[in-house]
Each structure stands twice: as C-alpha cells, then as structure tokens.
Image: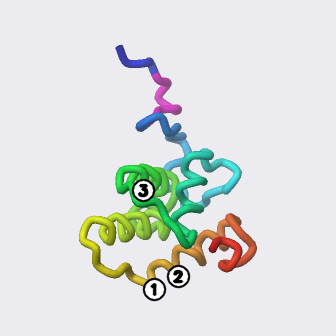
C-alpha cells in the first residue's frame, strides 16, 4: 500500500519534495536533503558517482527545487549521466558553470573547496 501524502509534502523515491518551493530559483543549501547534498558534492569532486540512477535522482531534485531545466546542477547531472552512458568527454564549460553555481548558492566559498 502506498503511504498517504499531504498535497504540500510529497516524495519521489524517498526524496522529500516541498511543492510550495518548486522551481523557485532560490535554493538554500541548508534545505537540501543530505542524500542530495552528498551526491551533488560527489558530482563536484574528482571522483564523481558512477551510478547513473543515483545521479539522475539528484538531478531530479535540482530540477524540481532549482531553476527547472536551466538549473546548472540539473544540467550537470544530465551531462554526467550522458558521459557515463556514452563514454564521451563531458562538457568542461558546463562543469565550470555547475561549480560556480554551487559557490553562488553557498555550497562552498570557492570552487576549489568543492574539488
């Protein structure tokens, strides 16, 4: 049986989704669930996750709570999954935009701290 959910508090794959705060373009790092924070930091690291399903799960959270399809964390997650699936080089400029975005929203003070 499925668990009942209130209309303003739903869940996708056990990741809480705050419906009132979707595609707000303002992401508070303190409100990012720990699992998403961990995967996001992993995507910024020198040894990013290699499980595309985990990366897509994080990307989906950023899509919902960030800027939708234009959110740099979402775009980088999709780009990284493309890289994993096709074994082609990833877009360095997109990665740089992702790191810059994480600094802008307060995940780190500087890009080097994310690596």
**Cβ–Cβ under 8 Å for marks 3 and 2:** no
Q: Quadrant of residue 55?
A: bottom left
Return the residue at label 2: 96
Return the residue at label 3: 55
Region of the chain picked out in magenta, as a range: 5-11
Q: Quadrant of residue 40?
A: bottom right
Task: Classify residue 111 as left or right of residue 98.
Answer: right
Q: Is residue 88 magenta?
A: no
The residue sitting at the bottom extreme is 93
The residue sitting at the top extreme is 1
Cα distance, mark 3 to mark 2? Answer: 18 Å
**Cβ–Cβ under 8 Å for marks 1 and 2:** yes
Q: Is residue 61 above or below residue 50?
A: above
Q: Circle 1 — which element?
A: helix
Badge 3: how crowded within 10 Å, few (<14), some, or many (20+)? Answer: many
Q: In the image shown, does 28 or 1 lie closer to the viewer?
A: 1
Task: Classify residue 48 as left or right of residue 89.
Answer: right
Return the residue at label 1: 93
Of callouts 3 and 2, which one flags the residue occurring earlier in the amino acid sequence? 3
């Amino acid at each position: 049986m499925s668990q009942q959910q209130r209309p303003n508090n739903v869940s996708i794959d056990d990741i809480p989704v705050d419906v009132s705060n979707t595609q707000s373009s303002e992401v508070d790092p303190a409100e990012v669930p720990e699992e998403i924070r961990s995967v996001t930091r992993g995507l910024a690291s020198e040894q990013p996750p290699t499980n595309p399903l985990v990366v897509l799960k994080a990307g989906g959270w950023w899509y919902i709570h960030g800027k939708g399809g234009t959110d740099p964390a979402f775009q980088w997650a999709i780009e990284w999954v493309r890289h994993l699936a096709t074994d082609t080089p990833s877009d360095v400029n997109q990665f740089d935009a992702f790191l810059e975005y994480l600094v802008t929203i307060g995940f780190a003070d500087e890009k080097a701290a994310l690596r």
